[in-house]
């Protein structure tokens, strides 16, 4: 009788006697084959660092504090007293160290001698324009919209009209810091240099933003 009941249970309720099999192993994470990464054209033309920088350049530049704005405006007032001479010194060093930048200036692209550059009427005129643009920014540091407008005009003009590679703005920012630090050592203390470095970062951010707005896609070439 016991055997018959047992048999009946096995037939009617087999799950009561079914041995639970071991749980299936957890699914392994799918192994995603590594994708082949094409060679960066920026690396091919020696500008991989610039390409890396451009990947993060749209992160907003660190804003200047009220103290730093005052520092920049105070030191700029002293620099601007020698506006043209300082501007010429900046451009001469820029063109001597990065001669490829001269390709955009037909008036003096043939010049290699620094003294000849210093005497160039066209170069001195452009130096004044550069310094006046910086002056417009410094005078309006309290007005972010005005700064954005000024630099937007500069960026779009250089992108659309002059076809200047945006990397040259980063390069000349470094040249500006070098020249100001050398020509005004008494004023450009570490604290002042930090404030000016942040300003140069903000200028570059606004200008590259203008390039992005007009859809700039041209790849950089070597700057040396």
Image (tube, helix red, strand yellow):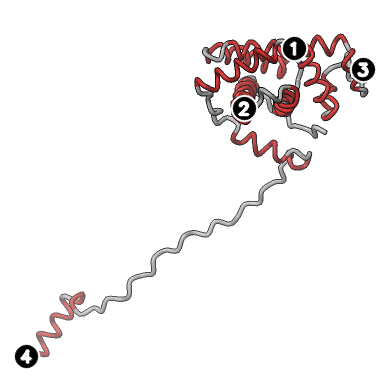
Mark 4 or mark 2, which has the lower sequence index?
A: 4
The relative height of residue 71 versus residue 12 in the rendered view (above or below) is above
The relative height of residue 1 versus residue 35 in the rendered view (above or below) is below
The crowd level at tag 2 (other Cα within 10 Å; few <14, some 14-19, many 20+) is some
Q: Is disc 2 placed on a helix, strand or loop?
A: helix
The label on residue 82 is 1
Residue in view at x 57 percent, y 29 percent:
58
User: Which circle, 3 or 1, is nearer the viewer?
Assistant: 1
Please say whether residue 169 is visible from this viewpoint: no
User: Which circle, 4 or 1, is nearer the viewer?
Assistant: 1
The label on residue 201 is 2
The label on residue 24 is none
The span from disc 1 to disc 2 (Cα, nearest Å) is 24 Å
Labels 3 and 1 touching (C-beta < 8 A): no
Residue in view at x 54 percent, y 56 percent:
32
Q: Would you name the residue on which mark 4 appears? A: 1
Residue 113 position, x and y percent, is 93, 23
Q: Is disc 3 placed on a helix, strand or loop?
A: helix
The relative height of residue 13 versus residue 161 in the rendered view (above or below) is below
In the image, 106 versus 92, the foreground residue is: 92
User: Which circle, 1 or 2, is nearer the viewer?
Assistant: 1
The label on residue 116 is 3
């Amino acid at each position: 009788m016991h055997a018959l009941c047992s048999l009946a249970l096995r037939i009617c309720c087999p799950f009561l006697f079914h041995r639970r099999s071991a749980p299936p192993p957890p699914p392994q994470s799918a192994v995603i084959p590594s994708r082949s990464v094409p060679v960066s054209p920026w690396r091919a033309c020696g500008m991989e660092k610039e390409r890396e920088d451009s990947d993060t350049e749209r992160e907003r530049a660190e804003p200047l504090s009220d103290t730093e704005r005052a520092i920049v405006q105070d030191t700029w007032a002293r620099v601007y007293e020698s506006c043209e001479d300082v501007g010429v010194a900046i451009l001469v060093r820029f063109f001597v160290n990065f001669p490829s930048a001269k390709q955009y200036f037909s008036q003096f692209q043939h010049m290699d001698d620094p003294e000849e550059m210093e005497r160039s009427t066209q170069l001195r005129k452009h130096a004044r324009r550069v310094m006046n643009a910086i002056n417009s920014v410094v005078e309006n540091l309290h007005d972010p919209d005005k700064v954005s407008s000024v630099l937007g005009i500069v960026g779009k003009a250089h992108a659309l009209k002059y076809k200047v590679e945006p990397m040259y703005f980063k390069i000349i920012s470094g040249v500006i810091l070098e020249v100001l630090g050398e020509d005004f050592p008494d004023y450009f203390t570490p604290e002042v240099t930090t404030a000016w470095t942040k300003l140069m970062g903000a200028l570059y951010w606004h200008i590259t933003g203008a390039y992005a707005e007009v859809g700039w896609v041209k790849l950089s070439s070597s700057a040396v």
